[in-house]
Each structure stands twice: as C-alpha cells, then as structure tokens.
Image (cartoon, rainbow, N blue to C red):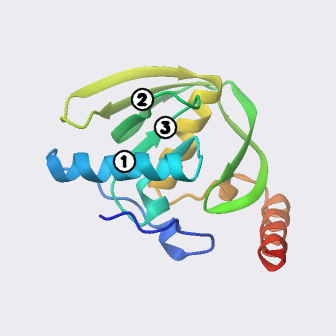
Amino acid sequence: MPVQSLILYPDPRLRLRAEPVTMFDDALRRDAAELVEALSRVSAIGLAGPHVGWLARVVALRLEPGTPASVYVNPEISFASEETAPQTEGSVSMPGVSDVVERAVTVRLRYADLDGTEHEVEAEGFEAACLQHEIDQLDGIFWIERLSRLRRERAVKRYAKARRAA
C-alpha cells in the first residue's frame, strides 16, 4: 500500500468497509509506518487506512504533537458508555469543515499491535471520541453521517464553498 494522497470527500472509497488484517508481517509494519508518516505530513490527530486508500483495519492516532503515534490493528469497541458528550470533529478528507458530534464518553477497545498481540484498553473523553471517529471510518461511516440531515447538508455546502474558493 504505498500511501498516495489523501482521499477527499465525496470519494466513494470513504464509504467502504475496511478489511481485517490477517497477516502481521513486515509489509504490515511498512504500511503502518507510511500511515504514521501521512499522519505527520497532514498534521492530523488520527488517520484510518481508508483516508489514504488503504482498505485495511488500521488506525494511527497521535493525541499530542511531538509524541509517538499509537497504531491500532483491527480495533473494535467492546463497550461504550451510555453517557455521551459533544466533541468538535472534522476530517482531513473534508478539510476546513467541523461540527459537533455526540460520542460515548468512555469506550473499551480491543485491538492488536503490529506483531499481532491482542490488547484491551479503556479510553475516555477526547481520546474515546477520536477512537470512535476513526473506527467509524473503518466501517465506512464518514463523520458527517453522525450529524442531523440539516447539519450534514450545511457541512457539505461549507466544504463545497471552501473548495471553490481554493
């Protein structure tokens, strides 16, 4: 999967479900390193494989600039709290547009590392929202699908206007 450029909305590939990773080998480590490099290049907090045209269930996340990125292979939410909170979200695939999305405050996540070792972690607040956002992308759910129809239409119009101006 040589990382090409970012896939931009409304590319239909953003709506495709990513495939589970079955081979934990050097090719996976190389592709994950390219995903982390792309994360740095676009100054994003998180990137899922589909953002760069790689339909594998891999997420790279860096919550704080200058810290190492975490890579989650085949991430799956095993628990989400009933309590939700608003989080401002956007996507590198729809630059210049953001809106508020309600997300579970706490999630428990099962995932594998690049060697295939299984892990389970609990995340809260901003980190939980970021993980939910990226896992949605792995499932072919673009973040604006979490908005009401009216807010989604407004977001798409803002994006179209910004692209025309660019």
> Which is in the foreground here, disc 1 or disc 2?
1
**Residue 21, visible in the rendered structure:** no
Residue bearing mark 1: 58
Q: Secondary structure at mark 3?
A: strand
- Give residue 112's position: percent from left, percent from top: 27, 34
- Give residue 84's position: percent from left, percent from top: 70, 29
Q: Secondary structure at mark 1?
A: strand
Residue bearing mark 3: 61
- Give residue 89's position: percent from left, percent from top: 71, 45
Amino acid at the residue labelled 3: Leu
Dot 1 crowding, Cα within 10 Å, few <14, some 14–19, many 20+? many
Residue furthest toward the bottom? 164
> Which is in the foreground here, disc 2 or disc 3?
3
> Which is in the foreground here, disc 1 or disc 3?
3
Mark 1 or 2, nearer chain start: 1
Q: Secondary structure at mark 2?
A: strand
**Residue 80, visible in the rendered structure:** yes
- Give residue 149's position: percent from left, percent from top: 79, 62
Residue at screen point 78% across, 62% down: 152
Comparing 4 with 85, the one in front is 4
* Left or right of 34 on screen, residue 122: right
* 104 versus 9 height, above or below: above
Residue bearing mark 2: 109
Q: Are marks 2 and 3 in contact (CB under 8 Å)?
A: no
Residue at screen point 41% across, 21% down: 121
